[in-house]
Image (cartoon, rainbow, N blue to C red):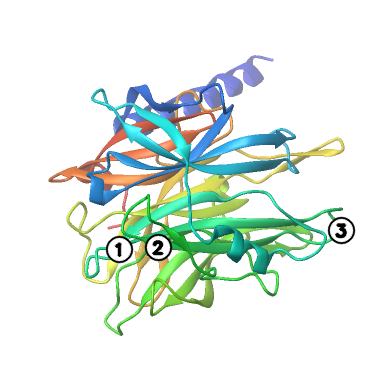
Amino acid sequence: MIIRGCLVVQIYSNLFSDFFNMKKLYTQQKNKVIETDKRFKYVMAVTLNPKASYKEGIIRCITNRQGDVKIKGYEDRSELHKITEDLSGYFKIGDRLNIKNEKEILDKLIEKNWDFIGLEDPDIWIDKETGLMHVYFTIPITYIDKTKKTKIHLGHAVGKDLNSLEMTMPVLIDTSGIWSKEVSIAPINKKGFRYNLFESKDRKEGISYSIIRVAIVKDMGSSWEYGNTVFHPAEHNISWIGGHASPGPLFPRTFLDIGEGKLVGLINGRETSKKIGDSVKLGMFSVGLFIYDYENGKIDWVSSKPFIQDSEAEAITFASQFIETGKGKGILYAHVDDSFVRAYTLEAEKIKTLLPK
């Protein structure tokens, strides 16, 4: 009995130690920067506009949820809304994002007996040569009676600003069961194209995984080419990212430089799900680190432990936007349990201590 009690104390001591060590490597800001309002119970996936000094952006708002976010099988209906920052650093959720040509494009994608459940997970990218804004987002389409697998396309819109966006056909279309969502934009390599990262799906031995693949991109505004899988949770013995993986923001080299052709980035990972009775309980989502070889489209390394886990998180800490604020300093925005968005202060020198030598 004494031995068992000591073991329990040691386990909790180790967990506390891991959390304390994570906290030392970043600063969790006390206040929430985006919260739900009377219209929405859940919000997530924030992206901010560099052209507006990151004072405005887009957020995904859940209009209806069926099920529990902690249990596999829940379904959300979503809208994209504009957000604007006030003088205190708090972002207010505004009107629904209006995208021209949206209905025309969706009509081409939605077949009979299929149901579009709303745009999700936006990312803003600015073309420095043209000044145009490109916005990427998830287009999920479910079969009405659930007898067929959901189709998930990576959608695209372009314009001068948030008020002039026009939707095009998706840059990646799910034609053979290949999901595409949660894009991470890579620099142009020496061959003149990009190996962008995106979240996809795979099944092994009856288990469903979120995996990371590359897209071969020669034009950011037109059709992309599917590339190889570069990270599969089933092929790595990393417990915190054993079930699902999704690419997060890549740090610019001005923030953290580890050599030509390589970038450090944030990766979102979920622990392996567990069967409890007739339900499947989803694992904890946390934020880790990875090293990306963007010249060759390969992930060289993923951290063995998570880097960030919010102190209030019960199920999810998910990174979506990084802003460099000074030499070796930056702010990360991540949503927590789909309920609010938090900011975290990051320092390059502290992150370096976690990287392989």
Marks 3 and 2 sit apart, C-alpha to C-alpha, by 34 Å
Q: Dot 2, crowdedness within 10 Å: few (<14), some or many (≥20)?
A: many
Residue 192: where, in percent of width, then height? 30, 82
Q: Is mark 2 on a helix, strand or loop?
A: strand
User: Mark 3–mark 2 contact, CB under 8 Å?
Assistant: no
Residue type, mark 2 in image: Val
Q: Distance between the residues labelled 3 and 1?
A: 40 Å
Q: In the rendered image, which residue does mark 1 sit on?
A: 132
Q: Which of marks 3 and 2 is in front?
A: 2
Question: Residue at image x 51%, y 49%?
Answer: 121
Query: The N terminus is located in which quarter?
Result: top right
- Amino acid type at mark 1: Leu
Which of these two is toward me, 311 or 76? 76
Q: Which image quadrant is residue 22 in?
A: top left
Q: Which residue lies furthest to the bottom in this view?
A: 191
Residue shown at 51% from the left, 25% from the top: 36
Mark 3: amino acid: Thr
Q: Tell me the residue that label 2 is attached to.
A: 158
Which residue is label 3 attached to? 147
Find residue 45 and report its horizontal and vertical position in percent. Answer: 48, 43
